[in-house]
Image (cartoon, rainbow, N blue to C red):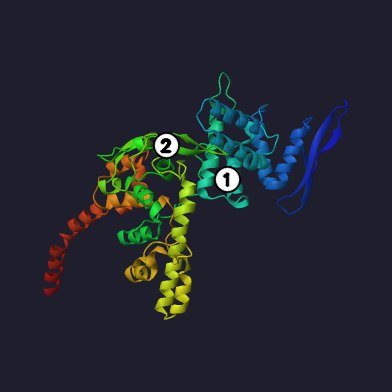
Amino acid sequence: MATPRPRQRKDGTVNWQVPFHYYDCDGVRRCTAESFGEDYEQAVWWCDYLARHGLDQALLMLEAKRGGGESDVLLDGWLTDYADMLLKTRSISPPVYRKYLGIIRNDITPFFGENAPIDAVTQDSDAAWIVFLEQDKGNGAKTIKNKHGFLSAGLRAAVEQRPVALLPFNPGSGMRLPACHGSEIDIFDSEEWELFEELIIERWRPQAEFGLVSMARPSEVGALLVRDVHPVTGAVKINKAWKDSGSRLTLGAPKTERGKRTINIPVQTLDRLDLDRDGDEYLFCTKDNGPIRASCFYEKAWQPARRRLDALARAAAAFNKGDDCLAYRYLSPFTRKALWCGADPVELVARYPAALMTLRHKHLTPYTLRHTGISWKLQDGVPMFVVSRDAGHESVTVTDRIYGHNDRRASESAAQVIAQRLPRVRANMLAGSAA
């Protein structure tokens, strides 16, 4: 590993050099050095960069840095100040602020160096940083997009700095990022939901059904008060949600600007809610009237139902093989000892054989309720702009991108249009063959 070496000039000053070797076009090993004058910190920074990214990239970085002029503003210092400014202006929440500081500490500084100036970020070094995140850090496409978005926004702020811009342009603008291919979401069909609701303890079923028909996010469901639900019309005002504030959760605004909305739930669901209480109490609450947050619903209601589903599927496979003894062993979560008071598991196996097979291979989370509610409405012909508004999406584009494949009406109509051509085309083909 290269290390800075001092070379004394005739006037007594010290010139810090970093020696290295390379091979010329004839394969001959050559030795040379880069000089950094009296700036020992820059020499150390370049040594570290050379060790991590190789000679070619280190020389490109040094050339770009020197070509852009020297800057006294350090990259990590500027980005920290930028994050501080966003927090002070309430553009971001404290959890997001801590996340940004983590990106600086764990991803940006280790790559560019502690003493890297702000103009050390070039288009070449930015591209190398993306490769570093993907290959060295093992980050996924969405994570890289989020981290690069923060760096690019900080560099854009440096370009817009007044009265004197810190950078002539934003090197992160227009950078191509790894493609982000989101996996297709899983939803319940009618029979699958009927089975899964049977596996949820009675005490949690109203909340689960409410999450499905309201299409509300779990964090929004847990923040609702009794007075947010109209007892006659079923209109529900959604204007708050639980937010992560680090060590605890706090009430804040919904996820998007359009998240503040009023939706309607079916009267059948309304009848299952306990609305004969004080309006300031939580709609879904614990035994001591505390809020049921998303994590509580997941641990107390969702996970036990998932375990029962897995046990039921294993028992069904054992029954099919004729091993009744093993099947009943799998059904231990449905015994009195397990405090099960629901339907007979053997009857569930007989009634839902197809749903048991399909549900086992689906990734089910409380968010599946929201996905299912949105998808069912689109499948049943509710206009997409209405579904998008009630779901609290930022735009119809978001709804179409994630759930548009569930609305098959346009494709079905298109199929009928092209079908009208087929008889005439086939008739012409038959006439041609006869001739």
Identify which amino acid the numbered label 1 is placed on.
Answer: Ile
Tag 1's secondary structure?
helix
Residue drawn at 27 percent across, 49 percent down: 268
Residue 389 image position (x, y, % from top left): 31, 39
Q: Which residue is mark 1?
A: 130
As drawn, is 117 to the left or to the right of 384?
right
Q: Is residue 242 above or below residue 429?
A: above
As drawn, is 406 to the left or to the right of 248?
left
Tag 2's secondary structure?
loop
Residue 394 image position (x, y, % from top left): 37, 38
As drawn, is 213 to the left or to the right of 47?
left
Check disc 2: other Cα within 10 Å, few if <14, some if 14-19, many if 20+.
many
Q: Is residue 222 above or below residue 313?
A: above
Check disc 1: other Cα within 10 Å, few if <14, some if 14-19, many if 20+.
many
- Determine which quarter of the picture holds residue 12: top right
Residue 401 image position (x, y, % from top left): 36, 47
Pointer 1 or 2: first along the chain: 1
Residue drawn at 44 percent across, 55 percent down: 302
Identify which amino acid the numbered label 2 is placed on.
Answer: Pro
Mark 1 or 2: in front is 2
Q: What is the distance, in whole Å, between disc 1 and disc 2 at their CAs?
A: 32 Å
Kindly tell me whether residue 391 is visible in this rendering.
Answer: yes
Residue drawn at 13 percent across, 71 percent down: 430
Kindly tell me whether residue 60 is visible in this rendering.
Answer: no
As drawn, is 71 to the left or to the right of 254?
right
Q: Which residue is mark 2?
A: 254
Where does the C terminus fall, quadrant-wise?
Answer: bottom left
Residue 314 image position (x, y, % from top left): 45, 71
Q: Residue furthest bottom?
A: 322
